Amino acid sequence: MRRTLRTVGISTIAGALGFGALLAAPAVNAAPNTIVIWVNQDRIANYREVFPTNSYAGYTIQLVGKESGKIRSDLATVTTDSAPDVIVGAHDWTGELAANGSIIKLNVPSATVKALAPTALNGFRYGAGIYGIPTQVENLAMITNKNLVPKAPKTFQELSTMALALKKAGKVEIPFAVQQSAGGDAYHMYPFETGLGGYVFGQNASGSVNVKDVGINSPRFQKNSYMIDEWNKSGLINSKIDSGIAQKAFTDGKAPFWVTGPWNSELISKLPFKVSITSVPPMVKGIKPLPFLGAQGGMVTKFAVDHGVQTGANALVTQFMASPEYQLPLAAADGRTPANKVAAAKVTNPYLKAFAAAGYGATPMPNVPQMASVWGALGGAWVNSTKGASAIPAAKSFAQAQATVVKAIG
Amino acid sequence: MQSWIARMGGTPALVIKIIFLGVLNAAAIWAIPAILANEAWPMLIIIVLATAGLDFIFLTKRFIPAKYVIIGATLLTIFQLIPIGYTVSVAFTNYSTGHIGTKQEAVTAIQRDALSEGDNAQQYDMLPAYNESQSLVAILTEVPKDAGTAPDATASTEPDAGVQTDFGPGTDTGAAPSSSTGSDLTSGTNDLNTTGVADAGSLPPTYIGTPQGLNLVPPSDVERDASGAVIGVAGYAVVPASDLPAIDADLNQIRIPGPNGGFITPQSFTTATELTPVVIYDPATDSFTNVQTGVVYTDNGKGSFTDPNNPDDELLPGWKTGVGLKNFTSIVTDPDIRGPFGFVFLWTFAYALLTVVLTFFIGLGLAMTLNKPGMKGQRTYRSMLILPYAVPAFLSVLVWAGLLNDDFGALNSMFHTTIPWLFDPTWAKVSCLLVNLWLGIPYMFLISTGALQAIPSEMQEAARVDGARQWQVFRLVNLPLLLIALTPLLVASFAFNFNNFNNIYLLTGGGPAVEGSSVAGATDILISYTYKIAFAAGKGNDYGLASAISIIIFLIVGTISAISFARSKALQEERT
C-alpha cells in the first residue's frame, strides 16, 4: 500500500512538472517588437494580403482573427498578456470603446487628415478627438432592374408611379424591395429618413456627434412624413419584406428596385439582366436621400502602451493604414471603397465606384453608445407605419420614436 | 458492473489518476506566473489550497466519500456558484459602458485623452537621434502650417458624373468608361509623403528637442537629401530604422517643452506634435480642472468625475464602483422600466405556463395513442414525431418566421388567409406559442412515452376490474402516476420557457412594437425585455441593471419552482 501511494505521488509530481513546463513556456515568452492586430475572422485573408511579410517598419505583425462582435466586447475583458495593440473594426464602436478608455486618442498628422475622406474620418471622431483611421467605407445604394425600368426615374414620385404600374400589370410581385421585418431595420430605411428631412443626431462643429440634437422627427421630416402613409397605403413600402424576400424578389426579376450594399456586388454582377446602381431618387426637391456611411478602420488600444509598442502602433495606424499602399490592395481583396482619396480615385471596380457615388455626402452612422436606443425606436416606427392596413400614422409613430430616444438619452 | 469496477481498481485507474492530477497540477503551475504578475493574492491562495487539497484527497487511501463528492462540488462551484456570485456582485455596481475599469485606469485614460493638439498646433517632422552622451533626442523640423491648405477640390465635387452606374450582360464592366472622377479626386495635395516644399529661400527651421527644450540648429549644420528633406544634423547620430522598434517605449516617453506651453510628443517615428492638456489632474484634491474654462470636475461618488454645478458634464471614462441598491430601486422607480414590467410579466408567465401545459397534454395524448401494443408503423410514427426535436431549434424558429410572414409567408398563401401572424400584437403571441408547441411537443412525447411504459399494467387492470372506465383509469391512475414522475421535468420546462430568449428573439424580436411603450414589444418576455433595457436602450451596455433584473427573474422562477416541487412532494406522499 505504502509503495502504491509513493508511486502515485512521484508519478503525479513528475507528470505535473512535465505538463507545467510545457504549458508555462509560451506564456512567459512574449515576442518583442510584435504588434498584435485583431481583425474580423471572416476577412482575415484579405488583411493578410496587405501584410504579405507579416511585418511593418521592423515590427512583426501578428494578425488574430476574431468574430467581429467579439473584437468589440473582448477588448473590455481581455488580459494585458493576450490583448491586441491595434484593432480593425467598425467606426460605430468608437464611442463605446473610447468611453471605456480601451482605445487611445490619436493625434493625426495633418497630411493624413487631408488624405482621407472627411466624412469617413468623422466616423472616428468622438468628443474632441479622433480615435481611429478609416480604411474602407461602404454604404447602401438603390439597384434598378433596367429590363423592367429602362428609363431611370428622376424623383421618388416618378419611381412610385412606375413601380406600382408594374405591380398592377402583374410584371412584378414587390414594387420596391427594401428590407425590414418585425424587429425593424433602421439602417436600410435610413435613406428614406434623410430623404424626408430627418436625421438621427446632429453634428458638433468638429464633426463629432451631438446627442443633444435628435432629429428623427425633425420639423422638416414632420412636414413630409405624410408620404410614408401614402407609400404604406399604396403598398410601395411594406415592412413585412425581410432581407431574404427582398433579395430573392429582385434577383428573380420580381422586383424592379432593391436597396442593398456593396457586400452584394458579386451577386449583382452575376444577374442575367441589366441593372443600374444609384442613390434613391429624391422625394423632396433639394434633398438627396442619403444612407448611413459605414467605415472600417484601425484603432490603437491602451494595451499598446503596456506592451511598449505605442509609437509603432501609432505609426502603423496613422501613416501606413491611411496610405494608398495599404488601402488599394485591401480594397481589391476586400471589395470596399478605400477611405484614402487617392486610393479611392484609383479603384477600377465599377461597382465599388457606383456604390461610392450613390453614397456621396453621406454622414457616418453615429458612433456614440447612445445609438443603442435609436435602432429599436426608429426601426419600430418604420415597421409600425408601413405594415399595411393596421399601420400607425407616421406623424404619430415617429413622434413617439423621437420621444423615446430623447428620454433614453436623458 | 462489478467486474468493471474491480478492473478499474488496478493499473488503469492509477494511470487515469496520474493523468488527471498531472493536468490539474500543471494547470495550477501554469496559472501561477500570471496570477503573480497581476498580484491577485486571494486568487493565488485559493488556487494553491484547492490544488493541494485535491491532490491530498486523491493521493490518500482515506476519505473515500470525499473522492466522489469533491468533483461534483468543484464543478458546481465553477459552473453555478461563481456565475451566480458574480451576477449578484455586479448587480450592486455601476458596471456599464464607460464604467468598466478601476479609478486609477480612468484617471490615466482621462489624462491621456486630455492631451490635445489644439486648433493651431505646430507639427514637426522628426528624426530620433543620439547626442554625444548617447541620450535619445529628437531632430525636429517644423511642418509649414500652410502646407496643403489649398482649397480641397475633392470636397465640393460630386463625383456622380462619369461614374458608370449601369451594369449587366453585354456591358463591358472591365474598363470604366470615364476616368474623369479619378482625375478630379487626384488633384490637390493628397500625397501623404509630401512634407513641406523645399524652397531654398525659406526652409523651415530645424531644432534639437531635449527634455530641456528646443535648440535651433544653424542651417549649415542641417543635412539634407536631394529633395531637401532633413536627414540628419552634424554631431548627432540618427537612429537607424532597424533600431526604431527597440526604442519604441523610450521614444513614447519623450516630452519636449514646446513654445506654446505644451509638450512636443512623438506621434510616430517621423512625426511629433505639440500637445497641451485640456484638463489637469490634481492628486491632492482628487479632481480635474479644465485649463480653458476653469471648471473643476470632482469624484461624484458614482464612478465619474463630474462638474458639481452641472452633473451631466462628466469626464470619460468613469470607473466601476459600488452603487448599493440603485439598480434595484430603479426597476421600481424608473417609469420606463416599471411601466411595461407588468404586462411583460403577465405575458411571460402565460407564455411559459401555456407552453408547458399544452405541450404536455398534446405530447401525452400522442404518446398514449402510439403506446397501443401491436400498433402498425409505431416506430415510424415515433421517429417522425421526434424530428422537430432533432433539428436545431434556432433553425426551426427562423424557418417558422419565414412561413408565418404576414404577406409573403407560405402559411397565408397556402390557406388564402390574411392573418397578421407577426405584426398584430395578439396574433404574434399566438405565433410564439404555436412555434413553441412545435418545438416542445416532441420532448413531452418522449418523456411521456417513457413514463407510460413504466406504469405497471396490473394497476390499470385492477382499476378496470373495479369497474373504472377508460377516462377514469386515465384520470385516477395514469395521470397521478405520470405526474409524480414528470413534475420535476415540467417545472424544469417551465423555468426553461420562462427564459426562452432564443425563440422570442428569433421569431419576432419581441415585436411588434406596443404603442406607448418605449422598449418592450408585444411578445417580449422578461429576459428579452431585460436584454433590451440593458443593451439596446439608453447609453450603451448596462451590465449592473441587467444583473439586477436577472436576480429578480431568478427569484421569481426559483419561488415558482419551489412551490411546484413542494406540491408534487405532497402529491407523492398522498399516494404512498
Image: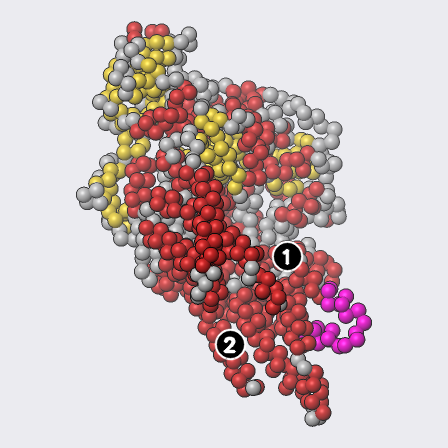
Label 1: chain? B
Q: Which residues are magenta?
A: B364-384
Residue A234 falls left or right of residue B328: right
Q: Position of residue B259 (x, y in %)?
A: 24, 23
Rendered residue at 67%/38% (across/down): A267
Helix, strand or loop at disc 1? loop
Judged by its main secondary structure, the magenta piece is: helix
Residue kind at label 1, given as amino acid type: Pro
Farthest residue, direction bottom: B466
Q: CA distance from mark 2 to mark 1?
A: 30 Å
User: Is residue A316 visible to the viewer in this orientation of the structure?
Assistant: yes
Residue B368 is a magenta residue? yes
Q: Residue at x 49, y 33 (%)?
A: A62
Looking at the image, what colour scheme do you see?
secondary structure
User: Which tag, 2 or 1, sits closer to the chain's start?
Assistant: 1
Quick one: label 2, few (<14), some, or many (20+) residues within 10 Å? some
Quadrant in the rendering for residue B242: top left
The residue at 42%/29% (across/down) is A33
Nearest to the observer: residue B295 or residue A363: B295
What kind of residue is marked 2?
A: Ser
Q: Is residue B410 left or right of residue B251?
A: right
Q: Quadrant of residue B232?
A: top left
**Vertical placement of residue A59 versus B386, above or below:** above
- The residue drawn where x is 25% and y is 17% is B133
Q: From the image, tell me which residue sits under label 2.
A: B564
Which residue is labeled 1 in the image? B392
Residue B511 in picture, x, y percent from top left: 55, 58
